[in-house]
Image: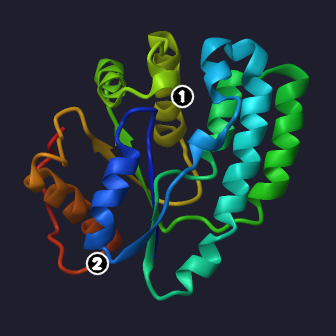
Amino acid sequence: MYIAIEGAIGVGKTTLSRLLASRFQADLLLEVFEENPFLADFYADRDTYAFQTQIFFLLSRYHQQQEVPLALTSGNNLIADYTFEKDFLFARLNLSGDELETYISVHNALAEKLPLPDLIVYLQAETDVLMQRIAHRDRPYERNMDQSYIENLNIAYSGFYNEGHTGSPVLRINTNQLNYVAKEQDLDWVEKRIRQTLKLHPYQTQFFNKA
């Protein structure tokens, strides 16, 4: 079983992936974004460094995603804290013109070679909540994060996963009021939602909405 956790910057993808790994006896596939040498410059000057940043991420994510079939042969489940398709979502936000056309050509050639998750868990949160979480984790290159960029990214994610998304099934979870680090019952609730969606025992047929 292959589950991917998705959502905008700061929503808690990696944290949830780590917490769920033991509950689903799953290996982890975590994005290695810190290795992108253009990332800090991109946040300082997005127009100048968008193409370099995006192409580096595209190839890095592709090489990581090539490991998925082998990982699944181990007999364990797999949980990733991103999907390959997110790369295209960011590219549409940050690129335009010839750069976007070039990117799309490379992306489409690579994407057709990769397996899709059995389920995408899309974590949602209001932009103010995302900004609070970004500030709390205090990554140096995110300290001057532009709220308008996070707002546009949040809108892009919402449109992508709520308006005609095709491919893997999507489970949408509003995380505004969730704290699955401090409250085990919140983590229990998320786990049960996933089990319900995938029909993995033990699961219940109905849950109260925590949104």
**Is 67 in front, or is 124?**
67
Q: How many marks?
A: 2
**Residue at (68% x, 12% y) in the render:** 45
**Residue at (10% x, 55% y) in the render:** 184
Residue 85 visible within the image: yes
Q: Is residue 119 above or below residue 52?
A: below
Amino acid carrying mark 1 in the image: Ala
**Is 66 in front, or is 162?**
66
Q: Is residue 139 left or right of residue 117?
A: left
The spot of residue 110 in percent (x, y) is: 80, 56
| Residue on which the image places disc 1 | 156
Quadrant in the rendering for residue 111 = bottom right
**Residue at (60% x, 65% y) in the render:** 116
The spot of residue 15 in percent (x, y) is: 33, 49
Q: Residues within 10 Å of mark 2 (few under 14, many from 20)?
A: few
Quadrant in the rendering for residue 18 = bottom left
| Residue on which the image places disc 2 | 200
Q: Is residue 116 above or below residue 82?
A: below
**Residue at (49% x, 11% y) in the render:** 148
Amino acid carrying mark 2 in the image: Leu
Residues at badges 2 and 1 in contact (C-beta under 8 Å)?
Answer: no
Q: Is residue 28 left or right of residue 201?
A: right
* Disc 2, SS: loop
* Disc 1, SS: helix
The spot of residue 108 in percent (x, y) is: 81, 50
Q: Is residue 128 left or right of residue 57?
A: left
Q: Is residue 15 above or below residue 104?
A: below
Q: Is residue 104 left or right of residue 182?
A: right
Q: Residues within 10 Å of mark 1 (few under 14, many from 20)?
A: some
The spot of residue 207 in percent (x, y) is: 13, 57
